[in-house]
Amino acid sequence: RRGNVTKEQIRPHNLVQQLPRAIIIGVRKGGTRALLEMLNLHPAVVKASQEIHFFDNDKNYARGIEWYRGKMPYSFPHQITIEKSPAYFITEEVPERIFKMNSSIKLLIIVREPTTRAVSDYTQVLEGKERKNKTYHKFEKLAVDSNTCEVNTKYKAVRTSIYTKHLERWLKYFPVEQFHIVDGDRLITDPLPELQLVEHFLNLPSRISQYNLYFNVTRGFYCLRFNIVFSKCLAGSKGRIHPEVDPAVVTKLQKFFHPFNQKFYQITGRTFNWP
Ligand code: A3P
């Protein structure tokens, strides 16, 4: 009598909801969804599908840690649960809150060249406005202060790309060894080596292989192959076409980010070829 059987009764008895042992804390538009989905190819990784927003949302946080655990997928004890909520990286209260849950948690940050990330961030907001038939400023107008002609550091898409500023807040709670930086630009063009670095960081045996990742020409991105019958690409909202930005503004932003990038390389020990 199937009608009387609860989900609980048909679930293998050793499945449990575990708190995450690793969190993708950001950065928004860095490729956080792709990273989570690709790590989920690993048999020992289980993902929380939704962004939980536990640590950055006061209302959720007030619900307590057991509420958070209840949002986690069922997994076997040897598996590790991962969640991603990109707002964690830039939200003031989050490092202390995560530290209180688990001071030895592993933290993943996926970054892209900061100006590209800012434009991607802008593009997402623009699309939201267009969906509601609203007009929106041009990127150039938001990113550069029209009075001073300087980069507008009040603009959120600019501030989010100052990675070192945010990271420095996290470093008040966690040692740098607890972070792993993922190259979001390389995750787009050649994901496997980036995923192998993450497997190593998470102390997992190397299980994700080239078989699991195939380039889909129509999609213009790598897609995921779990097995002979099941493959998937990310949703169409991942990989938007960016508007063209005035090259002078691009250069201005690149110059602005440069010293912050240098500091970021120095702290993390990972260097990128950003301009
Ligand atoms: P763009 O839309 O600017 O191209 P997030 O998940 O953090 O919002 O990041 C979105 C970005 O992930 C996209 O930015 C896209 O370039 C990138 N991405 C990386 N790998 C991808 C993949 N395999 N499929 C689709 N998008 C991918």
Image (cartoon, grey):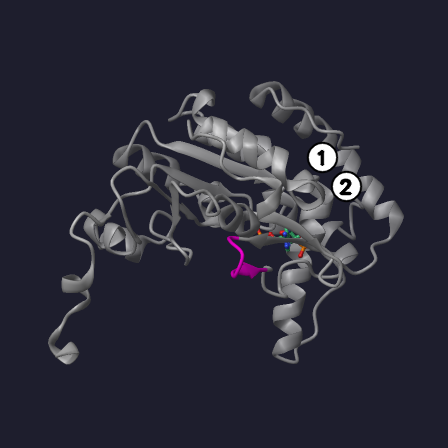
Kindly tell me whether mark 2's CB lies below 8 Å from ligand 1.
no
**How far is disc 1 from disc 2 in space, using C-alphas?**
6 Å
Nearer to us in this view, 167 or 217: 217
Decide: is 185 above or below 203: below
User: Was residue 263 drawn as part of the magenta stretch in this picture?
Assistant: no
Q: Identity of the amino acid at label 1?
A: Phe
Q: Secondary structure at mark 2?
A: helix
Nearer to us in this view, 163 or 269: 269
Main SS category, magenta section: loop
Q: Position of residue 183 (x, y in %)?
A: 63, 36
Question: Which residues make up the magenta segment?
Answer: 226-232
Q: Are marks 1 and 2 in contact (CB under 8 Å)?
A: yes
Decide: is 122 above or below 41: below
Label 1 neighbour load within 10 Å: few <14, some 14-19, many 20+: many
The residue that mark 1 highlights is 257
- Determine if residue 210 is in view: yes
Q: Position of residue 236 (x, y in %)?
A: 63, 66
The residue that mark 2 highlights is 253
Q: Position of residue 95 (x, y in %)?
A: 38, 36
Q: Please tell me which residue is depicted at 79% across the width and 61% down the height of the picture.
A: 243
Q: Please tell me which residue is depicted at 61% across the width and 26% down the height of the picture.
A: 264
- Residue ranking furthest to the front: 228
Nearer to us in this view, 189 or 10: 10
- Quarter holding residue 134: bottom right
Q: Please tell me which residue is depicted at 75% across the width and 61% down the height of the picture.
A: 241
